[in-house]
Amino acid sequence: MQVPSKYDATQVEEKWYEYWMTHNYFHSEPDEREPYTIVIPPPNVTGVLHMGHMLNNTIQDVLIRRARLQGKNACWVPGTDHASIATEAKVVAKLKELGIDKNSLSREAFLEHAWEWTHEYGGVILEQLKKLGCSCDWDRTKFTMDDDMSEAVIKVFVDLYNKGLIYRGYRMVNWDPEAKTTLSDEEVVYEEKQGNLYYLNYKIEGSDAILTIATTRPETIFGDTAICINPNDERFFHLKGKNAIVPICNRVVPIIEDDYVDMEFGTGCLKVTPAHDENDKALGDKHNLEVVDIFNDDATLNSYGLHYEGQDRFEVRKAVAKELEETGVLIKTETHINKVGTSERTKAVIEPRLSDQWFLKMEGLVKPAIEAVLGNNPEIKLFPKKFENTYRHWMENIRDWNISRQLLWGQQIPAYYYGDGKEDFVVAETIETALELAKQITNNQQLTSNDLIQETDALDTWFSSWLWPMSVFDGIRNPDNDDIKYYYPTNDLVTGPDILFFWVARMIIAGYEYKDERPFNNVYLTGLVRDKQRRKMSKSLGNSPDALKLINDYGADGVRVGLLLSSAAGNDLMFDEALCQQGKGFANKVWNAFRLINGWEVADIEQPESSKIAIDWFEAKFQKTLGVIEDHYSKYRISDALMETYKLIWNDFCSWFLEMIKPGFQQPIDKKTYRAVIDALENNLKLLHPFMPFLTEEIWQHITERNPEEALIVAKWPKAKQVNDTLITEFEFASEVVSGIRTIRKQKNIAFKDAIGFSVINNENTSSTFDDIIVKMGNLKSIEYVSEAVEGALTFRVKSNEYFVPMVGTIDVEAEIKKITEELSYTEGFLKSVQKKLSNERFVSGAPEKVVASEKKKEADALAKIEMLKASLESLN
């Protein structure tokens, strides 16, 4: 098979991905092998590939490809999430372009448009993941709105309701006025923003007295139903039992007392709007206050806003402030920093709102999930471990989960109303079952399905994805099927720390509730991908590169390596495109190494001793590195595993091993050595394959003709063997000797083609194992062991061994003496400074042991160097 002179990723990647797909290497079915299972964090069906996806899915692919090479039955389940809010927003925008108002459509008609949009645009990201090389089992692709997935969600809702864990309640919720739906507490992001503190004067009914309140939201005065003072605040004793008059709307409200009021904040008086603040709602309930809701669902003011009806809340804030200033009510304004809740999805400012919603009681459900991660014998490990504190904080301060959303796209809540109000309802998986339940409750056999009205709210998207590790294997509907019994619990979950509670914790809760077992063994939490200025990558900042363009420019393998080279577990990745260039450069290095080997002529000749030693050394080095790599994998240090592989191939294999065994110019290589080199190359490719699948498969298939079952993707991971540490240590010494010889050749312009003499005073009793290697790589005539210095030779040291290279040709003796004399003078000065420090008793007794040891080593090295330089001077005089 002809080997191209250059590696071209664009000619390779599509070819091998199609080959892998054609031969079904990614697909898994239960069998007798050990399973290794990963379920993908399902990206939003609206999504396109960004840098976070690239990092997350590269790590998953590394783990799944390694497991496959280890002979495990590797199953990586892909899929997408229906993303209620994001998808509905996309569909609404498309309808708007067509001149269609969402509100003019029936639920069925809107869902037709939603499915049409999903079929046209959804799943784009999964196709993009293929470009990255992700070896998912595409036959198992799931979507959270698939019929079977939706059935599982409804089944769980009904079950939890029947257990008394789901209830309907009128509560203060987080309202997203852009998406026009409630959100859970975890979907609200609090940001510090600068606003104003407005000081307003309220008149006291029946007198000329006034009181001053401070508020950040003057537009909410239309919802004021009380003024609250602290009962211990002497400044306001005269107001007890009186009423105040709310500006503009002139509503008369009571002045109530409660020690909730902070006497130090603002003026010590608090306006109470029970419909628009959670704390105010608590005060309202306690003091039996009227509740006045002043907002429409899009956060414009309703009729309670009087002449501001229909206007946006922020516009009203400005206008009300102006009106209050003109009427003398607003007496001053101060800048004020406060935390503002925004929607994680739409970025709209959240509006607290009272609403009938569905909730899941969490207090009892979380207990097994807390024990699973934080107990004495944890079943689930978080990597890095530091995230356990975050997990603990969330889980131990959990609140009931608001699981209903005012959306059409999603699983419709299976509650059916049969009476006039919202109190009369039944919960059932089907309308037929609901009808039978309603007949029993009402004792009315004349009821028909037409008398039932299903709840219009849909379920929170996370209420479907928290079942993901079970539902993708149909483990909710058919809990004893072969797939769920074989693949569950899954092995590793790779995701971002930002959804540790949204998704990870909830999956753990669901796993123990429905399988009485953990959903996965390990959770690897990646960092965020940031730019070189440490800014989070985003479209708005324009600092997020086009993922597909990166793949086109550097190859998928280059991008994968570039991402992983600096992505330590849990730490943010400072992405630099130069890292992808480094990855591409590494691919070229490996390709050129293969081309070098492939170009050698192989002959049936005797194997040189140097090659035999080189092969033994590389095997030892390979096994040593394999052990380090395995350790890194066990600790989910994926970037460290890559770096060890990188150094093994670039430094040990390419820079040393190939040089050691390389035949002379236009000379053949012996069969035995060539076979060993190919074996070493193939083992390297196996270690590198999880990181660079396309390059490695291309080289693997070029080495020799292979049957499909011999493809690299399903090859066998190298077996661990006993490590010959002695060989490794001896080579480290020998490599320094070779470097010393090369340095002298370079400094003295001694051409490599000229063989030179070489003598050694072996003070270290160094083994002669690598002498043949040193002779070959230094192009020496031979190595002679001597007992005293060789006159007229250039010298260098490795530890206490002295090495002598006879001068070849003519050199400028005076210039050489001057150069060595200067170096000797500098070294003697350095030695004096070190010895001065060591003669100081305060330093020796007070400094850390390591520091003192370091100074003593400097002294010994300097003394040895001085001795060597003096010897060199003597030989030149």
Image (spheres, grey):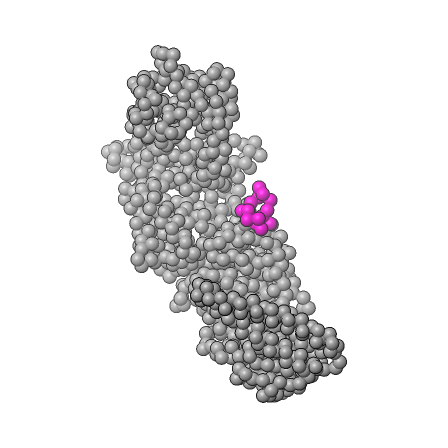
Residue 442 spot, x, y in % from top left = 25, 33
Q: Quadrant of residue 99?
A: top right
In this rendered view, identify the residue nearer to me: 364 or 660.
660
Q: Is residue 513 left or right of residue 94?
A: left
Q: Quadrant of residue 761?
A: bottom right
Residue 319 spot, x, y in % from top left = 51, 21
Question: Does residue 393 show up magenta in the picture?
Answer: no
Does residue 304 show up? no
Name which residue lies at 48% across and 77% down. 725
* Name of the residue lying farthest toward the left: 443
Residue 625 spot, x, y in % from top left = 50, 71
Answer above or below: position of 686 versus 793.
above
Name which residue lies at 57% across and 69% down. 832
Q: Which residues are magenta?
A: 531-545
Residue 445 spot, x, y in % from top left = 26, 34
Assign the N terminus to one quadrant of the image: bottom right
Answer above or below: position of 308 versus 736.
above
Q: Quadrant of residue 806?
A: bottom right
Q: Is residue 430 left or right of residue 590?
A: left
Answer above or below: position of 452 versus 810.
above
Magenta span dominant secondary structure: loop
Question: Does residue 544 show up magenta in the picture?
Answer: yes
